[in-house]
Amino acid sequence: MDDTVATRVEPGFDQVYFSASDGLKLAARDYGRGRDGTDKHATVVCLPGLTRNSADFHDLALILSRSEAAPRRVVCFDYRGRGLSEWDKDKSNYNIQVETDDVLAGCAALAVKHAAFVGTSRGALIIHALAAMRPGIMSAAILNDAGPVVEGAGLAQIMAYHDRIKDPSNLLQVAETLKTLQGAGFGALSNQDWRDLAAASFEEKDGKVVGRFDPALIDMLHAIDLNVPLPTLWPQFDGLRNISLLTIRGENSSLLSQATVDEMASRNPDMQRNTAPGQGHAPLLHVGDLPKVIAAFLRDADKS
C-alpha cells in the first residue's frame, strides 16, 4: 500500500487515492477497513456504471460494512474521468481494457488480493474482462443489470437521458429531470433516491452544475453505431462458471433482456437470478430487498 494515500475521512469510509500504471491519480472509497470481524468475510469490490462513480454504492457499502453478523470491507472505485479520479488527456483510454487494468492496480495498491465483485452496468462488463484477465482475484461476482449481450435500445436510452440534462440550474432540477425521464421505469424509488442520484452524478462548482465525469464519455457513447450489432461477451461470461454468481436485472431494464438472462442461466445453471421490482437500468442496490438478497448471496459465497 505504499502508493496509496488516504487524504480525508468521511462518515463511514476513508477517501483514498492511488496511481494507475500510467501515473494518473485515481480515487476509491474504502469502507470498514480494519473493523473487527471483516477478516472473516470476503472483501467486496464495487464497480460503477459508465458515467457513475463510487457514491452510487454508498448506502449498500454502509449496510455491508456495518453488518453485525458479517461485517465486510467494501472498496468502491472511481474509474479515470469519473468521481474524484483525474481525467485522462488521452480520451481513447476510456475503454474497458484500461479501466480493468486500473481496477487491478487499485486492488494491488489497497492490498485486495481476493474479493467478491459487484459490477453495475459497465462495471459488470469489467467483471467479464476480469474473468478473462485475472479470474483468480474474484471469489464471487454480482452482475447488476448487464451481461454478455448489451441491448442497443438500452444504450440509446442512456444517450437520451444525458442529452436531456443540459445546463441545469441546481441539483434539485437535476433530480426532477431524472425523475421525469426515468420515473416510469423506477417506481420503487423515493424522492430522496432521485436527489441522491443527482448529488452523486453532479455537483455545483463555480456557480454552475456540472457532471462528476468527463464529458468525453458522452461523446464516446454517441460514436457508437447502434445500427451495427454490438460485440457479445459469451466466452468471458463462461469464464465465471467457477465462482459464485448472481445476476440482478431491473424489472423494466432496456439494457439487459430477459432472454439474455435466460441464456446466461442455461450456460451456468448454478447462477442465481434476481429481478429488482419497480426498477429499470440500472437498479439501485440499496432499494427494496436487494441488500438482503446481496448479503445472503455473499454469506453463501463465503462458504463455497
Image: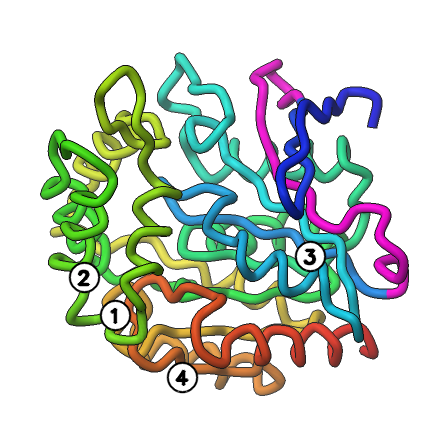
Residue found at x 12% / y 40%: 163
Find residue 67 and report its horizontal and vertical position in percent: 73, 68
Q: Can you give x and y, in whole percent of width and height, for residue 118 in the image?
A: 57, 59
Query: Can residue 147 be seen in this snapshot?
Result: no
Disc nearer the start of the sequence (3/4)? 3
Mark 4 near mark 1, Cβ–Cβ under 8 Å? no
Queried whether the magenta region covers residue 134, the answer comes back as no
Residue 251 placement (x, y as % from top left) = 31, 79
From this view, report whether residue 222 is shown above or below residue 153.
above
Rounded to the nearest angstrom, the CA distance separating label 4 from label 2 is 25 Å
What is the distance, in whole Å, between disc 4 and disc 1 at their CAs?
A: 23 Å
Q: Please tell me the numbered disc located at residue 262.
A: 4
Residue type (three-letter) at the residue carrying disc 1: Phe
Check disc 2: other Cα within 10 Å, few if <14, some if 14-19, many if 20+.
some
Task: Mark 3 and mark 4 in contact? Answer it, CB < 8 Å.
Answer: no
Residue bounds of the magenta highlight: 19-40
| Residue 192 visible in rendering | yes
Mark carried by residue 177: none
Q: Residue at x 69, y 37 (%)?
A: 14
Q: CA distance from mark 3 to mark 2?
A: 29 Å
Look at label 4 and name its amino acid: Asp
Identify residue for label 1. 186
Name the mark nearer the viewer: 4 or 1: 1
Q: According to the image, label 2 marks what residue?
A: 182
Residue that badge 3 annotates: 44
Residue contact between numbered discs 2 and 1, judged by CB atoms under 8 Å: yes
Please identify, in this view, whether the residue under mark 4 or under mark 2 is nearer the observer: 2
Please tell me whether mark 3 or mark 2 is closer to you in this view.
2
Distance from disc 3 to disc 1, alpha carbons, whole Å, reads 26 Å
